[in-house]
Image (cartoon, rainbow, N blue to C red):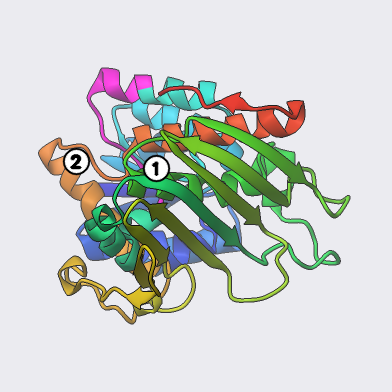
Amino acid sequence: MTIGLVGAGWWTQAVHAPAFKKAGARIAGVYAGQSARARSLAEAYGVPLFLEYGELLEEVDAVAIATPDTTHVPLALEAVRAGKHVFVEKPLGVNLEETRKLLREIEVRGLVGMTALTARADWGAETALAVVERIGEPLVFRGAFLADYLADPQAPVPWRGRLEGGGPAGVVGDLGAHLFDLVAWLMGGRLEAVFADTARFFPERENPDWAVVSARLGKARGGLELSRVHPVRPQRLFLEIEGTLGILRVEPAFWGPAEGARVFFSSRPGTWAPVPLDPGLLRGRDPKETFGVFHFHELARRFLRAVKTGEAPSPSLLEGVRAQAAIEAVLASAKQKNWQEVPYV
């Protein structure tokens, strides 16, 4: 299968490009403007740098899109309408309406769409999924994704902090997509209602730096925190799910080597006991590979397999749309200061 790289930032260079090459795709070109990074990426893989997106689409079976959030859906729609499969970074878009439109276009054409929800290829998260039934019926969930990438108030504001590139969601889209999807995936449902507060701590930013969310999923109640201004490295993601029989805690390896993921279980009542990571879930990957590289080797493999077999990939584009629905409800709740139902998708 031939694939085009759309975007030439550090994530494409360090993660997307090597992952798709290792998975067996033939990289056919790069579309990312005329920057030095774009030329360097194209040269590194011995492929053309396309200045017209349509010309790239003529040469590929699929595209991997890693560009500013506001451009995800427009680029993906153009590819889909040209009959190409799409692998799209999260958050899938900047509003639910546009992501639903993309989903409809893909379904009508029978193409494969996949959202890069990284936790679904995490060694710890996959291990947690295999043992989550040990907690019994879920009662409470709590979690956080705390990062420092905008912690310095004196640093230049990147596109993620601006409406033009990051859209209105800010941290709710960038980190919330991961956490909301992790909750839904491990609990086997979807976030149904939220009550949220957001804040923009530094005036140069144009979208939220921080959010706290109360949420409902079935009978379970939960609390989630998101921050991109947490001043302490490394970034960390965790989720606890408390049930009638016990509690499970997962700490995906979203920093450092994949073997750093941790899973713990405690009976009710009890104390934390580590759950060994299942080596069968490595699928040939090196546990010493770092965050992103380890995860995308598996995500790229799933994408190529879905294109070949026609089966739905995990995470699918639908799951990206569902994460977008939660993002939109959180933003609406923070603005209106009330509970918001998460639109059903």
Does 69 sit left or right of 204 as displayed? Answer: left
Classed neighbour count for the residue bearing mark 1: other residues with Cα under 10 Å, few (<14), some (14–19), many (≥20): some
The magenta segment is 104-117
Front residue (pair 176, 16): 176
Identify residue type, mark 2: Val
Q: Which residue is mark 2?
A: 307
Helix or strand or loop: what does disc 1 sit on?
A: helix
Helix or strand or loop: what does disc 2 sit on?
A: helix
- The furthest residue to the front: 269
Residue 108 located within the stretch drawn in magenta:
yes
Quarter of the image that includes the C terminus: top left
> Is there a contact, CB below 8 Å, between mark 2 and mark 1?
no
Please identify the quarter of the rendering in which residue 309 is found: top left
| Residue at the image point whose x is 19% and y is 59% from the top | 24
Q: Earlier in the sequence, mark 2 or mark 1?
A: 1
Identify residue type, mark 1: Ala
Classed neighbour count for the residue bearing mark 2: other residues with Cα under 10 Å, few (<14), some (14–19), many (≥20): some
Q: Is residue 48 among what the camera can see?
A: no
Residue 129 % position (x, y): 28, 56
